[in-house]
Amino acid sequence: MASFDNIRRSKSFVRGSEIMADRPMRRPKRFTLKRLILILIILGGIGWGGHYAISTIKANTEFSVELEPGLDRAGIAEKIGEELGWSKKEKQVFAGTHAQIQWMAFSEEALQSFMERFRWGDLEKESFLVQATKYIEPEYDFLALLYAPGTYVIKGDQSMAEIADMLVSKTEFSETGLKEEAVLKTVELVRRDVELLPDLVPLPAKDVRIDRRGSDTLLSFSTTYYNQGKGPLELIADPATKGIRSDIARDVLQRIYRVDGGHRDRVAGNFLWHQEHLHYHFADFVIYDLEAVDVKNPPDLSGVRTKSTFCIRDVSLVDKNFSIENRVEKAKYLICGKELQGISVGWGDTYFYNYVDQNLNITDLPSGTYRLSFIANPSQKFEESSYDNNKSSVLFELDMQNFKVKILEETPKDLPAVEHIYEEQVF
């Protein structure tokens, strides 16, 4: 890769949150006070004053600073600042100045690298540039560890901007020097901006009760999950297996739509034939997990945790007073099809307590306090905008002598109500 001295900007770069087009970008030899003010304002509203000039150093003095590998910007600022007698605040200002100058120097090369590596098009390019001010935040700062270790000679009359520019001028852009975790988070940030991903949220269990069937005691419950994302969860059976009459496990493609009308498909799991329901289910869609919270001589419940397959479709309408930006008025996925299933935005699916498999066998459990949790998309087989809200639970008292259940707490709280619309479709 070329060093910054050899880079010439001919297309675009980002300054603050603006996209600057058709202006060449060159390493400046000198920084004006006005430009330095702008840099510091962008980095967090830090005002400039004579306090942050290198005023404690004689102008004609030179200092050698050794920067070893593995430092972040704060570490670099600490090393330089200790040598130059900076205050804690001055070190913070320098770290911010370094971040901004570094981004301006390498933004185009980073963009080109990302476009090639992740096959970005113009839509991703625009998103990356528009969101540029986010990339100096720690979570997305892929340039944080990018610098050339070695000895730097700093003159006493150099400004912070000039020192930062010297560091950048000796640095070569290379993916091996990037913070890989931040690169991937940056890519996800762009993807969330460009793609209409679903976001599934399970409601806490409803209708929790005890049913006795012969010698078995069952904990029965109703399950509802809904989609509050930007786009639908759409699952399409692999066209290569279309028309096969035998009941095989069929690969499923998740279709992810884009804001420009395009889409991409990715393998997300399997459709399995469900004999009791007489249609196809998506494998391992939800986990039902029962755990003992306050039980005398608590039992081993490892065998009670159950993976459940689901037919995925629009049958429950989320309360319209609950804010969901891209909700659709009309349900699209109405049947448990062999080729297509899904959940529209603003819609959900409900499995009632008296449906097949909507229970856990608790025959040998003692009385006590338990927690029943639902975990949607437990293996993250399909992509969502967030996986942080895929779990819900109810805390309850189990009375095995009287075969009663008392709900103590639901988590999370303040979730929307849903209305089951298509009651005639039992499964």
Image (cartoon, rainbow, N blue to C red):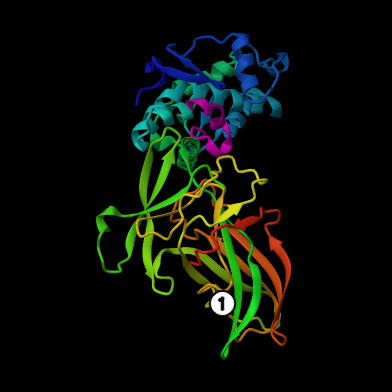
Residue sitting at the far front: 424
Give the camera-side residue of 296 and 92: 296
Find the magenta span and give its range. Answer: 129-145
Query: Percent x, y for residue 235?
Result: 40, 53
Say if residue 312 shows up in the picture.
yes
Q: Is residue 266 left or right of residue 393?
A: left
Query: Percent x, y for residue 61?
Result: 60, 14
Give the camera-side residue of 189 and 344: 344
**In the picture, residue 353 is in which quadrant?**
bottom right
**On the rendered image, what quadrant is the N terminus found in?**
top left
Q: Is residue 400 left or right of residue 382?
A: right
Give the camera-side residue of 8 and 230: 230
Query: Percent x, y for residue 179?
Result: 47, 39
Give the residue drawn at x 34%, y 32%: 116
Give the camera-side residue of 217 and 193: 217
**In the picture, residue 372 is in which quadrant?**
bottom right
Instruction: Tell me the amino acid under the disc marked 1.
Output: Leu
Q: Which residue is mark 1?
A: 360
Element under label 1?
strand
Give the residue drawn at x 44%, y 18%: 12
* Label 1 Cα crowd, 10 Å radius (few <14 / some 14-19 / many 20+): some
Give the residue drawn at x 46%, y 14%: 27
Above or below, comparing residue 117 to residue 108 in the picture: below
- 281 drawn magenta: no
Above or below, comparing residue 48 to residue 303 in the picture: above
Above or below, comparing residue 223 to residue 29 in the picture: below
Query: Percent x, y for residue 294?
Result: 71, 76
